[in-house]
């Protein structure tokens, strides 16, 4: 199974290199806008004929080499196609930020510590930060078309990296882990040894509430600067939540390791996801965050020869993991406790959710290996 991750690499150009990079990304962006205007006017998305009408200008006015000119056409065509897939019929696409799309081994290469790239002023070699990136340079990953990005005074290279991983096989699963996603505990995991592991969500919940208060204050103001700050805050909040989800998914795969089957609830659809949480918590974009955590866990699991399945969430919060009795009253959402109305088994409600998911995972393995 192929896994692709986008590595965001910070590069550290010296002053004259910055100059070369700046000129190149600016020219590339301007060339994209030039081509975009032609595409918009002619509605032509064919690379070969676009090449004929734009090539002279791209070379002479924007100073691009022929390979860069081809990349510009590709970048613009792709952007129009995406825009049309999203239902925008022939609106002019503009490229605001400086950028540069680089084809592996032609426009750039990456070796341990050195990023080598074609610029308008020739090839330059720029050092980059390798901390945390070591695993991608063991020769087993292939690098795709990268984007050179200039953001907040810093230079980054976004590189899609792919590698083929052997899929975990049901016959070799050694451990089943039920993972309940929630707000009190971001994740509660229950494993085959009967051990429970909590990823505490309280500080996260507090920070989300803090964001909510700020958001309400800004929403009341209705000025353009308040709207700008609101947007920036939303982006900051998403980045922070993304970081948390990376931490949780990483913690899960490193804790349980190879040949693990992770069992999650299938929370596709906002309605189901919001049902899980209390009314006043609804402002939290729970479904987005859960979905992201699941997709992070899925690709990280693949890299560790583990597997993730998502099961129907029906009754996972109401069923007694000891005697199987299912009743809404088993669970007290206010006190976060589970108390079986039949056998009296009592526990934390996130934990019983994880226990029930663990059981569904065992059933899945039994069915998969029977065939
Ligand atoms: Zn019971």
Image (tube, grey):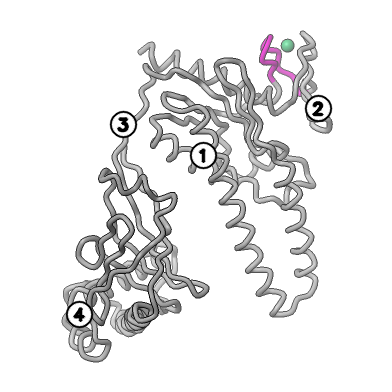
- Could you tell me which residue is drawn at 66 percent across and 25 percent down? 353
Closer to us: 328 or 102: 102
Q: CA distance from mark 3 to mark 1?
A: 19 Å
- Could you tell me which residue is drawn at 69 percent across and 80 percent down? 224
Q: Position of residue 182 (x, y in %)?
A: 67, 37
Question: Ligand 1: does it lie within 8 Å of the C-beta at label 4?
Answer: no
Find disc 3 in the rendering and name its residue.
166
Tell me which label, 3 or 1, sits earlier in the chain: 3
User: Label for residue 354?
Assistant: none
Badge 4: how crowded within 10 Å, few (<14), some, or many (20+)?
some
Question: Is the Cβ of the residue at disc 2 closer than 8 Å to that at disc 3?
Answer: no
Residue 61 seen from this side = yes
Quarter residue 157 falls in: bottom left
Q: Is residue 262 shown above or below 67?
A: above
Q: Is residue 195 left or right of residue 174?
A: right
Q: Is residue 200 left or right of residue 344?
A: left
Find disc 4 in the rendering and name its residue.
65
Q: Is residue 215 shown above or below 30?
A: above
Find disc 1 in the rendering and name its residue.
250
Q: Position of residue 293 (x, y in %)?
A: 55, 43
Provide the secondary structure element on which disc 4 rests. Answer: loop
Q: Is residue 251 shown above or below 241?
A: above
Badge 3: how crowded within 10 Å, few (<14), some, or many (20+)?
few
Magenta residues (range): 319-328
Q: Position of residue 277 (x, y in %)?
A: 72, 40
Tell me which label, 1 or 4, sits earlier in the chain: 4
Q: Nearer the viewer, mark 2 or mark 1?
A: 1
């Amino acid at each position: 199974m192929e896994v692709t991750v986008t590595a965001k690499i910070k590069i550290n150009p010296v002053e004259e290199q910055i100059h070369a990079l700046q000129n190149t990304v600016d020219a590339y962006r301007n060339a994209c806008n030039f081509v975009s205007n032609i595409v918009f006017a002619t509605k032509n998305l064919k690379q070969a004929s676009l090449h004929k009408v734009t090539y002279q200008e791209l070379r002479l006015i924007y100073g691009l080499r022929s390979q860069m000119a081809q990349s510009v056409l590709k970048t613009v065509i792709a952007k129009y196609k995406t825009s049309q897939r999203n239902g925008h019929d022939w609106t002019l696409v503009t490229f605001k930020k400086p950028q540069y799309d680089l084809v592996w081994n032609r426009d750039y290469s990456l070796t341990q510590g050195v990023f080598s790239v074609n610029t308008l002023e020739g090839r330059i070699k720029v050092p980059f930060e390798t901390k945390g990136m070591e695993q991608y340079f063991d020769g087993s990953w292939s690098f795709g078309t990268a984007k050179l990005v200039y953001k907040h005074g810093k230079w980054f290279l976004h590189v899609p990296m792919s590698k083929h991983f052997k899929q975990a096989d049901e016959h070799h699963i050694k451990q089943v882990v039920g993972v309940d996603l929630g707000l009190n505990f971001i994740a509660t995991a229950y494993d085959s040894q009967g051990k429970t592991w909590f990823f505490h969500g309280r500080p996260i919940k507090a920070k989300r509430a803090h964001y909510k208060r700020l958001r309400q204050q800004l929403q009341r103001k209705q000025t353009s600067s308040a709207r700008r700050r609101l947007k920036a805050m939303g982006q900051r909040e998403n980045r922070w939540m993304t970081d948390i989800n990376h931490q949780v998914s990483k913690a899960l795969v490193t804790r349980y390791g190879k040949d693990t089957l992770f069992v999650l609830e299938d929370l596709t659809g906002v309605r189901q996801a919001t049902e899980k949480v209390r009314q006043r918590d609804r402002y939290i974009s729970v479904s987005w965050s859960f979905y992201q955590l699941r997709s992070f866990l899925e690709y990280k699991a693949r890299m560790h020869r583990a597997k993730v399945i998502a099961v129907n969430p029906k009754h996972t919060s109401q069923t007694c993991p000891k005697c199987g009795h299912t009743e809404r009253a088993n669970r007290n959402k206010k006190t976060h406790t589970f108390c079986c109305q039949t056998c009296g088994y009592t526990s934390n409600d996130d934990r019983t959710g994880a226990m029930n998911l663990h059981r569904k995972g065992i059933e899945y393995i039994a069915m998969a290996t029977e065939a």
